[in-house]
Image (cartoon, grey):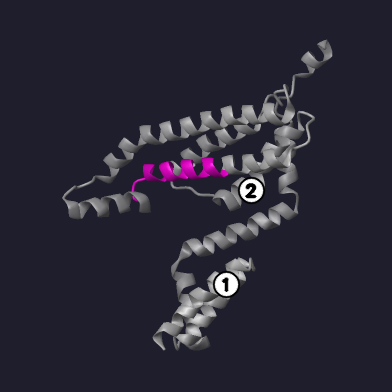
Amino acid sequence: MEYLVLLGIAVVIVGFALRLDSILIVFLAAIVTALLGNLGIDGFLTTLGESFVSNRSVALFIIILLVTGTLERNGLKQAAAELIGKAKGATPGIIIALYGVMRLVFAAFNVSFGGVAGFVRPIIMPMAVGAIEATGHKPDEDYVEQLKGMASGMENVAWFFGQVLFVGTSGAILVKTTLAPLGYDVDLLQLAIIEIPVALIAVGVTAAYYIIKDARLRRKFYGGESGVRKPDSVKEGE
C-alpha cells in the first residue's frame, strides 16, 4: 500500500505526456498523493495552507503575476512598445543588454521584480518588438522567438551572478555552508567582493554576445538593412 502513494508521480507523467494543463496536473497529483497517503482532504488543505504561509516567495510570486496580468490587460505592452518606439537607434539587442545591466544592479541589492514572467515577458519583449516596428519592419515570428531566448538568458545570467553580490542571500549562504564542512571558512563580505568582477564579466560578455547575435539576426531577416531607424534628418537628405 505504501507504493500506491507513488501514483501521484504517474499522474504527473501521464498528464504532461498528454500535454494537459500543468497547474491542473500538479493539483490532481497532489490530491491523489494526499488521499493515498491517508492525509485526507482536511490534512491536504492544512498542509497546503501551512506551506503557502511559510513560503513567502510563493505568495509574492502570485501577487506579481496578478499585478502583471492586470497591467497587461490595461495596456502595459502597448505603453512599453510606444516608449521604445520614440528612442532613436534602439535595437532589440541593445534593449536586452541594457536590461542585463539594470538587472545586475538591482540583483546586487537583492531586489527582484518578477523575472521572466513578471518583467521580461510584459515589458522587455514588447520593447524589443517595438524597436523592430519602429524601423518600419514587421516582426518576424522566428526572430521574435530568438529574442525571447536572448531576453530570458540575460535575465538568468544577471540574476545568477548578481544575487551573490548581496551579503546574506541564499546563494552566498549555500556556498558558505557547503565549504564549511570541508574546512574552508568563507567570509560572506569577501565572497561578495570577489564576485564583483565575475558578475561584471559575465553580464558584459553576455550583453556583447547578444548585441552581435541580434545584428546578425537583423541582417538575416531583413536583408542588408540593419533594422535601426534612421534619424529624420538623414531620411530627408535621401
Which image quadrant: the N terminus? bottom left
Residue 168 drawn above or below residue 151: below
Does the magenta portion include 229?
Answer: no
Of the image marks 1 and 2, the number of the one nearer the N terminus: 1
Per the rendered image, the range of residues in magenta is 152-168
Residue 63 drawn above or below residue 183: below
Q: Mark 1 touching mark 2, by CB under 8 A?
A: no
Residue for point 73% across, 37% down: 130
Amino acid type, label 2: Arg
Residue 11 drawn above or below residue 102: below
Q: Position of residue 222 (x, y in %)?
A: 73, 28
Specify whether 221 is left or right of 186: right
Report the front residue among 219 and 190.
219
SS at mark 1 in the image: helix
Q: Position of residue 110 (x, y in %)?
A: 44, 47
* The quadrant where residue 95 appears: top right
The residue sitting at the top extreme is: 237
Q: Position of residue 120 (x, y in %)?
A: 60, 46
Q: How many marks?
A: 2
Disc marking residue 14: 1
Distance between the alpha carbons at the discs numbered 1 and 2: 29 Å
Amino acid type, label 1: Val
Instruction: State which mark lies toward you, 1 or 2.
Output: 1
The residue sitting at the left extreme is: 183
Residue for point 45% across, 78% down: 6
SS at mark 2 in the image: helix
Residue that badge 2 annotates: 121
Residue for point 78% across, 32% down: 137
- Mark 1: give few (<14), some (14-19) or many (20+) Cα within 10 Å: few
Disc marking residue 80: none
